[in-house]
Amino acid sequence: MPPLLDARPGRSFALRVQSGTTSFYPGRPSDTLGYNGSYLGPTIRVRRGDDVAAVVTNGLNADTTVHWHGLLIPGELDGGPHQIIAPGATWRPTLPIRQPAATLLYHSHVHGLTAEQVYSGLAGALLVTDDEEQGLGLPSEYGVDDLPLLIQDRQFENGRLVMPGGMMVAMQGRRGDTILVNGAVNPLAAVPNRLVRLRLVNASNARIYELSFSDRRSFHWIGTEGGLLEHAVALEAITLAPGQRAELLVDFTDGRSASLVTAADTNSSMMGGMGMMGRGARRTDAAAPATVLRFEPRPLGQARASGVVPTLLASRTGPDASKAVRRRRLSLNMGMGGMMGSGSGGGGLTINGKPFDMNRIDETVKLGSTEIWEVSGEMMRHPIHIHGVHFDVLTRGGGQPDVLDQGPRDTVLVKEPVELLIRFDQPAKSAPFMYHCHILEHEDNGMMGQFSVA
């Protein structure tokens, strides 16, 4: 488990961005990046209502940023491409925590290097807690029955981490042959034989996970990117795209071992039902799910009752669609130039036909307004992430949203048109917010735009 960096009692925390070596396999060191360590970062916990002083020092020989993904804060604190931390410099934002309990993440977001720096290790979990959540009696013993789990796929050669490149990477994003959880290969979690809370974070560059348990046990989905759902949802499988999070309650009182597994990686323009070779690949690989994490229930810690899943999790008043004052349309485009991986701007990786430009504001939004954004993608499923907001999915493909679309979101999968209802309550005047595909190579190569809120 990552170490816990609790912002209380001092209401502050410090991160050092650093390079180092990590042995994912014994005796096989790899060059990596991390926060306060050689790979990944500590779990940061903050509390609603606090103003938290962050101190971030860049110990690399390259620019970096730290984006607080899912945190509802003004644009100049967001940690996007405009908040560069130069080598040797220190960034000292004070973060006003004013949102409900949720599982968030933090990661590098320096334009052109996001994919490379995140792949090398610059990511971590960020937890928001509040009184409402703590009053529910949910599992809350960090590292015992409350587990943040950063899921990544990485490529290894002779036991050493390598960074894939080439045309297919530009087109599909970096994908690996090995699944890590919290930086561990072949991970095993010893859990108490009771109800356990899993905070799943997709920290992969491009892979979408179709998660279930090897014994087909059901679980309760209780939270998404924006926080707890109103009611728990019983499921046997859940989809998790890059940048997305999901909180699950899993009952291990039967004492039986089980593995979290994922279906074959099929989301690319060359595979997976989205393009030329998809159907055959899906049939061939569907029978061989990959193991993500093995669970071994044991009598751990103080004996206690398993607990029950609360009937009502979180009360919430979402945006009102009748108050929407404007509709915008975003199309995530993959032209032939993008398929060939042709340098800056991707040659075809764009939004509404325009590659990202740091000096261009693409959309201007009025602070406090509610809008409907219709987003669609080309050739494959794209996880669209919008900074500074949580949104509700209104429609998908002209019909009702999917079961997994519910709750407050900051990242959602699109291919068919999806309507998002968004209220803009955070200002972004001196520094804009981003919207982009969270396949990180797409983002770096032009599939990103920016908007101001004033």
Image (tube, rainbow, N blue to C red):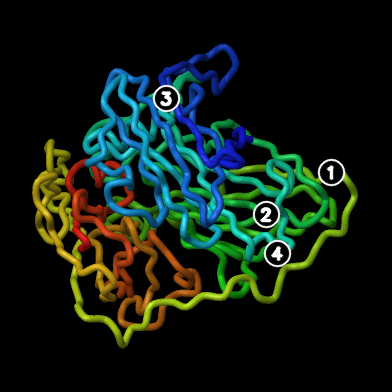
Q: Which residue lies at the image location 36% right of the left edge and 54% below the top edge?
A: 73
What residue type is disc 4 on?
Gly
Instruction: Name the residue beneath numbered marker 4.
Output: 135
Please give the residue where the numbered disc 2 appears in the rendered image: 197
Q: Amino acid at mark 1?
A: Arg
The residues bearing labels 1 and 3 have C-alpha atoms spaced at a distance of 34 Å
Residue 160 location (% of width, % of height): 46, 19
Q: Nearer the viewer, mark 3 or mark 4?
A: 4
Residue 74's image quarter?
A: bottom left
Left or right of residue 107: residue 324: left
Does label 2 or label 4 sit earlier along the sequence? 4
Q: Residue at x 48, y 18 (%)?
A: 158
| Vertical comparison of 99 with 262: above or below | below
Is 127 displayed left or right of 109 in the figure?
Answer: right
**Element at badge 2?**
strand
Residue located 47% across and 48% down the image: 51
Q: Which residue is mark 3?
A: 33
Name above or below for residue 84 compared with residue 353.
Answer: above
Q: In the image, residue 159 lies at what x, y percent?
A: 51, 20
